[in-house]
């Protein structure tokens, strides 16, 4: 078993790990669509939106000459393409803004707030997410996530899994990487965190992608903790 | 009266505005000095330390070729000079580290936590301090400051009152400057915040420097709010 006694801070992937983006967005948009009288296959829109997420960040990564672009802007650009593709009619500028900031109104998984609250008693807890600072801050207020601070790819102008994000978080906390633990439902995120010396905790979120989930049903690396939920991580971390 | 209905976030100067650094440090060091058997005029050390604060940041500002240096490091450098100057004997490396991180163990003014807690119900609240991120995060846990996020000069690699700090905070929040209110016990900080379009709230802290206080006994500018404590700011902001 790994020695975790040196860990001082836990940093969290957010989309899928802390919050259930898919159910939250589908419910939010379906309800809103009815009130607003906009017809669309919201489930398909949400799944399509997430499907282009990685590619939208790769665009930023491959074009450093254009500067860093925050996730809210990438989300908006992708949405405009999807609206055209799905032929959704009648959306105003305010509607597009409302849909884009849907990513600020995500609910935690049932165990998230309770687990974070326990972990916060003994450790520094922070997101380490590709979401921009404003998105993560608004989401924390909406979902009651009790972060000590908000760390985002935006602060480092690099998206995960670029090394600048993991090492930048440790640097901001003035901690060596081995005193920081990355918590994620995604094996690839932990693989990169571990490569840069962070401790790792995998939490399984088999419903993240609904019927579309294809991987991350189980740990595929040697992570320091493998847990079924945040409560189990709190148990393991002595909270 | 100013229209404050557009304000979405309040950002706070911290040393002197939110926390009573002088009393906290004097008490912390006096108690520790006794246990540790180190004799020193701790009040003089604390006052001397704060007296070189502005100059230490000016050094960073005037020497951009050396890169940004966080406040913990500036505090440590100043401490080493003061220890020599005051001829304090017997300090180990661990002692110097303990004294330096005294700035992480500051207590709020009596109204701070209650006022922030009220303001947090309706607004985003964050420090906007020259303290580095780790210092502010540790202090928040120590003093129970319920920040939504932690913004520091470190994130912008510029100390207040450089424009990058005020404008950088608004940018991270994705808000226009006029939707952000700077709260400070220092007229000079508010003067710069106002120049860059932020709303301003002055809170009087006439005991910040103890018997050494020379100014900031009253508002010297046209601030949007002038208050005796954070409770009055919360009243004015409708919380």
Image (cartoon, coloured by chain):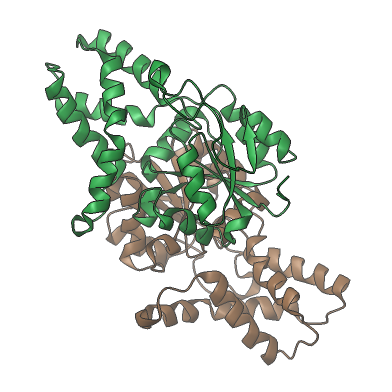
Chain colours: A green, B brown
B48 sits to left or right of A21: right
* Residue B220, percent from left and from top: 40, 64
Task: Classify residue B155 by image quadrant.
Answer: bottom left
Which of the two residues, A232 or A9, is positioned nearer the viewer here?
A232
Which of the two residues, B197 or A93, is positioned nearer the viewer here?
A93
- The residue positioned 64% from the left and 81% from the top of the image is B79
B136 sits to left or right of A36: right
Task: Classify residue A82 by image quadrant.
Answer: top left
Q: Looking at the image, can residue B222 be seen?
A: no
Which of the two residues, B232 or B76, is positioned nearer the viewer here?
B76
Q: Quadrant of the N terminus of chain A?
A: top right
Residue A224 sits above or below residue B131 on the image: above
- The residue positioned 76% from the left and 80% from the top of the image is B92
* Residue A54, percent from left and from top: 31, 39
Which of the two residues, B195 or A145, is positioned nearer the viewer here?
A145
Residue A86 sits above or below residue B43 on the image: above
Residue B33 sits above or below residue B149 on the image: below
* Residue A14, percent from left and from top: 46, 36
Q: Looking at the image, can residue A117 be seen?
A: yes
Residue A20 sits above or below residue B88 on the image: above
B132 sits to left or right of B163: right
Q: Quadrant of the C terminus of chain A?
A: top right
Instruction: Please count the marks in the image.
Output: 0
- The residue positioned 66% from the left and 47% from the top of the image is A123
* Residue B77, percent from left and from top: 58, 81
């Amino acid at each position: 078993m790994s020695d975790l006694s040196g860990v001082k801070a836990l940093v969290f992937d957010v989309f899928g790990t802390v919050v259930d983006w898919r159910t939250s967005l589908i419910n939010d948009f379906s309800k809103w669509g009815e009130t607003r009288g906009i017809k669309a296959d919201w489930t398909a829109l949400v799944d399509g939106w997430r499907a282009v997420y990685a590619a939208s960040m790769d665009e930023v990564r491959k074009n450093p000459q254009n500067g860093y672009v925050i996730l809210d802007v990438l989300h908006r650009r992708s949405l405009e393409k999807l609206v055209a593709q799905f032929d959704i009619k009648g959306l105003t500028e305010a509607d597009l803004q409302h849909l884009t900031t849907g990513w600020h109104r995500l609910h935690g998984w049932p165990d998230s707030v309770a687990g974070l609250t326990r972990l916060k008693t003994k450790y520094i807890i922070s997101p380490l997410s590709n979401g921009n600072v404003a998105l993560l801050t608004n989401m924390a207020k909406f979902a009651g996530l009790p972060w000590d601070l908000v760390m985002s790819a935006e602060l480092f102008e690099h998206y995960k899994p670029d090394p600048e994000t993991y090492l930048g978080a440790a640097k901001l906390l003035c901690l060596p990487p081995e005193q920081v633990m990355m918590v994620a439902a995604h094996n690839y995120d932990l693989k990169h965190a571990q490569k840069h010396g962070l401790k790792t905790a995998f939490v399984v979120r088999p419903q993240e992608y609904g019927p579309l989930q294809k991987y991350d049903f189980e740990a595929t690396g040697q992570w320091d903790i493998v847990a079924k939920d945040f409560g189990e991580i709190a148990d393991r971390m002595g909270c």
